[in-house]
Image (cartoon, rainbow, N blue to C red):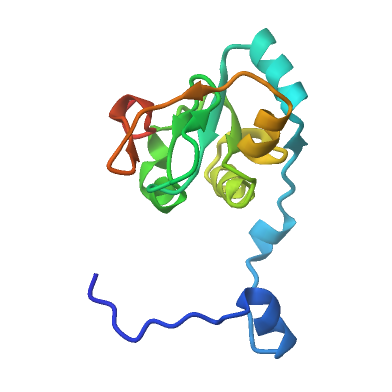
Amino acid sequence: MGYTQVYCFKGGIPEWRSFTYPMEVNATYANLKVRKISPRKLHAMLQENKDVYILDVRPIAYDRENLFIKNAKICPMVFLGDWYHNIPKDRQIVVTDWANKKAILAAKFLRTKGYSVLGILKGGIVRWREEQLPLEHRTIIDGRPLQENRVNEQ
């Protein structure tokens, strides 16, 4: 990529703040509220309304179980800025990931772009699985999902 001298602050943002280092907070993102939808509630919504668009924003080379909510589209968070225009604007969107680490950022991003985001899946796929709701296995090749499951292949 051409980057040299890239560093990581070991304690992340919490430690950065503890040292009172300067930090800029995007007020738009900070003020956006995103609803957390329980797995059971989302399952019921999917039974009633097949038009809910499930967006899974897990990383590209996700090395855990390849379990997904049926018909979920995959858009790794790193590609969301490039691929979001392929997500249908006329659909209600619920964003998820494995353990609800990135979903809220993706949901806020989509809301700033004018998308109708119902919310995020509370607890992610981990909680969905714990509640024994239906999942499907997906084939992953070289750490990437098959093309037909990706957002960029509508």
**Which quarter of the rendering shows the C terminus?**
top left
Q: Judge whether 7 appears above or below 41 on screen.
A: below
126 sits left or right of 51 in the view: right
Q: Is residue 57 above or below residue 26?
A: above
State the residue in front, 59 or 2. Answer: 59
Q: Quadrant of the N terminus?
A: bottom left
Whether residue 44 is visible to the viewer of this picture, yes or no, is: yes
Measured along the vertical axis of the image, is residue 139 above or below residue 27?
above
Q: Residue at x 34, y 86 (%)?
A: 5
Closest to the observer, 40 or 143? 143
Q: Residue 133 at what x, y percent from top left?
A: 67, 21
- Spot occupied by residue 152 in the image (x, y as percentages of width and height): 33, 34
Q: Nearer the viewer, residue 85 or 60?
A: 60
Identity of the residue drawn at 51% across and 30% down: 67
Q: Quadrant of residue 83?
A: top left
For the residue pair 137 and 89, the one nearer the viewer reads as 137
Q: Quadrant of residue 95?
A: top right
Q: Position of residue 42 (x, y in %)?
A: 70, 23
Going by the picture, which residue comes out furthest to the top? 48
